[in-house]
Image (cartoon, rainbow, N blue to C red):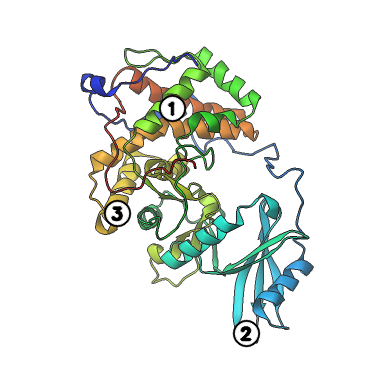
Amino acid sequence: MKLQATILAVGEASKVPFKAFNPVEIFQKVRNEHGIMNDLPVRTATKNFNYAKGTPKANTSPEKALMFCKEHTGATDATISLLGEGGQGVVYNCSSASMNFEAAEKLYRYPSTLDTERMRIVDQAMSDSGNGPIYYGTIEETFPPAYVNFYELLYGDTIDKIESIRPSDIDVYRAAAKKFASMHIITEEDCPRPITNCYHTWPWNTRAIQSHYDSSPKEAHEWVDDRIAENPVHGPFLNITSGDGLIDFMYDVMWGTMSPTVWSHNDAHDGNVFIRDAGQDASMEERLMLIDYDNSEFGTRAWDLAYYVIRFYEKFNTDIYEDFLNAYLREYNRIGVRQFSYEELEQEMTCVWPYLFMEQSVFYKTIGVDADFCNFMFDVMQEMLLKYADGTASCPWTGRYPGFPKCNPPA
């Protein structure tokens, strides 16, 4: 592949300051250019992003759920009621009055697509560390296929369904910052999963940029090529004139960032931030929990934080952004293995912001999200690249912070 994206090598790093940019200013600038004065465009997927097409589908009916509920509890008076459902599975309330027991029972639609060993390890680790709901166990059947998990039943709702609470509320994002810090100190011993983010294409918090991009469809690649051709990036320190050049640059910055490898949620959108019902005296820190660790693995810390921060959307401003990072640092520096300064974390974020916006825009394009929103996300990324091109931002390779795990090479 012809390298069309240039980035500073170690020996050239002194030519440009090791400098971060303010993503909020870029975000709001592009938002105004797109004429988005209130809410951002609706993000409605028009395509069924079903990776499990053609695989055996499990029976997730109420009758099957009741059978599993009775098997798990050993109670003849066990009952079930529907709590909710999505593309991945159906969730029921499994309860027994005689056992004084109730749990969330999740029946997965496509068990044969699951890494069930991984799921058991992760669910147990998140339960033991207090970072996720209490895990009660699993029922698995080979034929017909079935995979059923039982968790602590949480009373409350996810933040996307609560009009009175938003991710950008100060008590919410500060509580979330503490949850991220608690999760990011989890070790390989706590959660014995291989660290593969340097060569595995999924989750999307990966350094295997080329392979991950190659997994997206041809029409998404053509869209990227067209947008780069319309607005190439030129400057003394960076030139990108094609989709290939863009991917080369993203590979460089994701490898160049000093952001450490930590246990990452990787999917902390509004639907995975749960707010428990509680009395008036309960703090948001007691009520808020990150849920659904199906996409969690060891990954780049700054990417995990950036993915959550962009959920602030129309409320995204400099004060909130800086306060969120400082709230995270206060907690991480209290419980973590190393003290970090704000400048260090800000530089980590600068290195991953372009890839975060590129990856998300391509993903949204792939699943048929509104064109205006995809274009908006991509244009934010391009504005960030201009900061690299004119030398006001950089991500020079200076090594990794010691004391953090490294990617395990493939066997």
Which image quarter: residue 6? Answer: top left
Mark 1 crowdedness (10 Å alpha carbons): few <14, some 14-19, many ≥20 = many
* Numbered disc 2: secondary structure: loop
240 or 176: nearer the eye?
240
* Numbered disc 3: secondary structure: helix
Q: Residue at x 44, y 40 (%)?
A: 409
Residue 250: give its label: 1
Q: Residue at x 57, y 34 (%)?
A: 363
Residue 77: give its label: none
Measured as percent of width and height from the top left, residue 22 is found at 32, 32
Distance from Cα at disc 1 to Cα at disc 2: 54 Å
Distance from Cα at disc 1 to Cα at disc 3: 27 Å
Residue 99: give its label: 2
The outermost residue toward the left is: 14
Residue 332: give its label: 3
319 or 270: nearer the eye?
270
Q: Residue at x 70, y 37 (%)?
A: 47
* In this rendering, position of residue 348 left or right of residue 303: left
Measured as percent of width and height from the top left, residue 91 is found at 66, 62
The answer to whether the residue labelled 1 contacts the one labelled 2, judged by CB atoms less than 8 Å apart, is no
Is residue 36 visible in the rendered image? The answer is no
Q: Nearer the viewer, mark 1 or mark 2?
A: 1
* In this rendering, position of residue 125 left or right of residue 402: right
Measured as percent of width and height from the top left, residue 164 is found at 49, 56
Amino acid bearing label 1: Met
Q: Could you tell which of marks 1 and 2 lies nearer the N-terminus? A: 2
Distance from Cα at disc 3 to Cα at disc 2: 40 Å
* In this rendering, position of residue 277 left or right of residue 180: right
Amino acid bearing label 2: Met
Measured as percent of width and height from the top left, residue 241 is found at 47, 13
25 or 207: nearer the eye?
207
Mark 3 crowdedness (10 Å alpha carbons): few <14, some 14-19, many ≥20 = many
